[in-house]
Amino acid sequence: MAGKHEYSFFGAVEKSFENAARFTNWDPGILEQIKQCNSVYRMHFPVKIGDKVEVIKAYRVQHSHHKTPCKGGIRFSTAVNLDEVMALAALMTFKCAIVNVPFGGAKGGISIDPKKYSVYDLEKITRRYTAELIKKNFIGPGTDVPAPDYGTGEREMAWILDTYTSMRPGEIDAAGCVTGKPVTQGGVRGRREATGLGVFYGLREVCRMEDVMGKLGLQTGIEGKTVVVQGLGNVGYHAAKYFREGGAKVIALAEYEGAIMNANGLNEDEVFQHRKKTGSILNFPGATNITNSSEALELECDILIPAALENVINGENAPRVKAKIVGEAANGPLTPEADEVFAKKGVLVVPDMYLNAGGVTVSYFEWLKNLSHVRYGRMEKRFTENLNTHILGQIETLTGKQVANNERELIMHGPDEVDLVYSGLEETMITATREIMDQWKKTPEIPDMRSAAYVVAINKVATSYVELGIFP
Ligand code: GLU
């Protein structure tokens, strides 16, 4: 079973980690501790599907306990295996560290194709998986907090919450046992679009940096940039949406059945509706079909955003990629070989473990909301509005002039939950981008932005271990 490929994705993460660790001065013991997965839970459990019993294989890996709880999504896919879950858990540790989200990294997975099961059966599988996690103390607001990932969403998170609360009655912070919940079940507004929006905020900040853009031969700013997005799931859809709204042109969208292209730009929602109606992204009015989907990755464009699965760009196809910037919205879309090709070609790879951290950042906000038992904005919205109204009134009296109606609304507006979540996310992504770029400038021998991001992450996790008093 554990053949050559079984450990390849985790091996790639280890390789990137080691490449970056060379640029730090930490004790080898600390580095080894950071690299390893702390706890690995592999389970098999029976679920009755129709009149047959199916044995379901599932995992939860806690990569690091330097901060608790551990945090990371749960994916439903036939590609799920131990190696993949370990790699994704490790990426979560580094991701949380970079964006200053005080969690250790974790990841879970169930090896099923969710499309092959009825909603009823999926609910049974999800609830049983949750029960297995509870049995071993692998879930809870203070221990390990799952979230959506590939193949899961709000519905599954609601099942997890319900299973948890019924097995742990009276636990006052139970809602914080999982994030990405529906808003009615303790979710936070803005979580659904958070990863895609974070990808946009991160890349927008990179595109604002004159020196970085100069080296790539690009103008600063998002406006007018050509973008290709692979994956029209939650992350890809929202990334495409914010780029389009920001003035970029999304010239191609790719899904597994094929890709479409239109040099004048595509509207992601129209494409999404077309796909829902016809069952395929192909034959979208006004667009050209690309039947071999992976060819979309090789189109001439400014920014390529792989927002689907890991290992889609490797040593074989990387030389043909023409994008100037690759923004990793998915987890692990590039292999280390692809990194080497891009570093040589001068393509800027903006790495997954910070670029797609918007999801976990807003999960953190959701968890805080659950622990505080109050909606963001509830306490200050009216106060701010009253104060702004008063200030505006004073300005108008003193100047004898009136502010235009649309401006008036903007100035008086007190923050709603979604305003605070978006601004918290924007601040987080901007700060993280600058921190990584500063690290890279400080240590110019670092070969790429991924290694610079790892260095930032390693420094934070290592500092935390030292402060815990575990290492000298
Ligand atoms: N699955 C997402 C990720 O890979 C979100 C994790 C979370 O919110 O905990 O970052």
Image (cartoon, grey):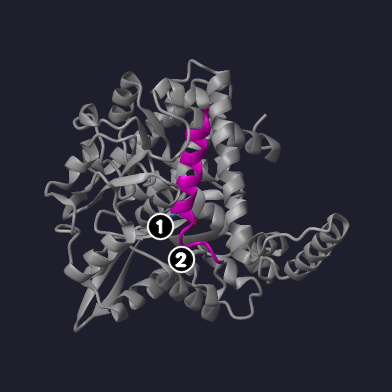
- Residue found at the very far bottom of the displayed protein: 51
The residue at label 1 has a CB less than 8 Å from ligand 1:
no
Horizontal relation, residue 398 to residue 179: left or right:
right
Tell me if I can see residue 129 in this picture.
yes
Q: Around disc 2, counting alpha carbons within 10 Å, would you say few (fewer than 14), some (14 to 19), or many (20 or more)? A: some
- Residue found at the very far left of the displayed protein: 291
Horizontal relation, residue 35 to residue 420: left or right:
left
Residue 108 image label: 1
Query: At 40% across and 66% down in the image, what residue appears?
Result: 153
**Front residue (pair 361, 160):** 361
Tell me if I can see residue 69 in this picture.
no
Query: At 57% across and 40% down in the image, what residue appears?
Result: 430
Cα gap from disc 1 to disc 2, whole angstroms? 10 Å
Tell me where the magenta segment starts and ends, as one range. Answer: 189-209
Q: Relative to 62, say whether 215 is above or below.
A: above
Evaluate if marks 1 and 2 touch, with contact meaning CB atoms under 8 Å apart: yes
Looking at the rendered image, the quarter that the C terminus falls into is: top right
Q: Position of residue 271 (x, y in %)?
A: 26, 60
Q: Amino acid at mark 2?
A: Leu
Kindly report which numbered mark, 1 or 2, lies closer to the viewer in this rendering. 1
- Within the image, what quadrant is residue 263 found in? top left
Number of numbered markers: 2
Q: Amino acid at mark 1?
A: Gly
Q: Position of residue 230 (x, y in %)?
A: 28, 48
Disc 2 is placed on an element classified as helix
**Front residue (pair 313, 289):** 289
Residue 133 image label: 2
